[in-house]
Amino acid sequence: MQESLKTFQKYSQEVTKSLQSINSLKIDDLAKKICFALKESKKIIILGNGGSAANAMHIAGDYMKTFSLLGLKPRISTPFDNLCFLTAASNDVDYSESYKIYLDSVLEKDSIVIFLSGSGNSINLIKCCNSKIFNSLKEFESWSITAFEGGKISRLTDKFLHIPTRDMEVAEDMQLIIFHYIKQKLYLEIINSSDYQEMSDSDKYYKRTILNEVS
């Protein structure tokens, strides 16, 4: 019992240390770019592997629901939105090439491409950055969000946000914390803006959470 508590304390201390050490100005810079993309219906493309892939799907779904209900038309996607494509491309070509094939087919002007990675050294993400289209289409912005030493991908993207930890699970926790913060920040900015018109009168979420009612 005591050992379990001690272990959790150490883990929470590592999360707190990462939160206090991360560059918050870069997070707010990313928030501005995402806000523009949401308001102007520009593409936001998020890629990662394993836990980072799961986080990418969570972020995409969370943002799609939240900002669609505010009347925006989010265009946010991941390669995992179409598992048929991903498995077919991996089977017919190679898994390490599948993300590049996906990105080459969806990348367009004014897109934001976000790579989530613990190490920053996953070969399929590196191949995306080395693709011909990625390097020839200039009018988009790429971000890498990685931990450990940053990895090779941190030197291949336009912007790099370093998560200061050498713990993979903490790195993945931080990915979600960053994007949950950005979502809340942008949500408040949008609903408090002078041109906002409420699009939905649904209060089911409010009833379930604040009023503790079944809805």
Image (spheres, rainbow, N blue to C red):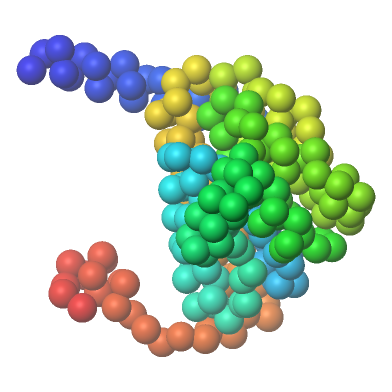
Q: Nearer the viewer, residue 6 or 60?
A: 60
Check the image and report above or below for 195 versus 158.
below
Q: Nearer the viewer, residue 69 or 169?
A: 169
Check the image and report above or below for 195 versus 90.
below
On the image, the x and y values in percent for residue 49 come to 51, 40
Q: Nearer the viewer, residue 116 or 23?
A: 116
The residue at 50%/55% (across/down) is 87
Give the position of the C terminus as an image quadrant.
bottom left
On the image, the x and y values in percent for residue 89 come to 59, 54
Check the image and report above or below for 27 versus 81.
above
The residue at 31%/72% (across/down) is 205
Number of numbered callouts drawn: 0
Residue 132 in view here: yes
Q: Is residue 72 left or right of residue 214?
A: right
Looking at this rendering, what residue extends furthest in the front direction?
Answer: 92
- Report which quarter residue 143 is drawn in: top right
Q: Nearer the viewer, residue 60 or 19?
A: 60
On the image, the x and y values in percent for residue 91 come to 54, 50
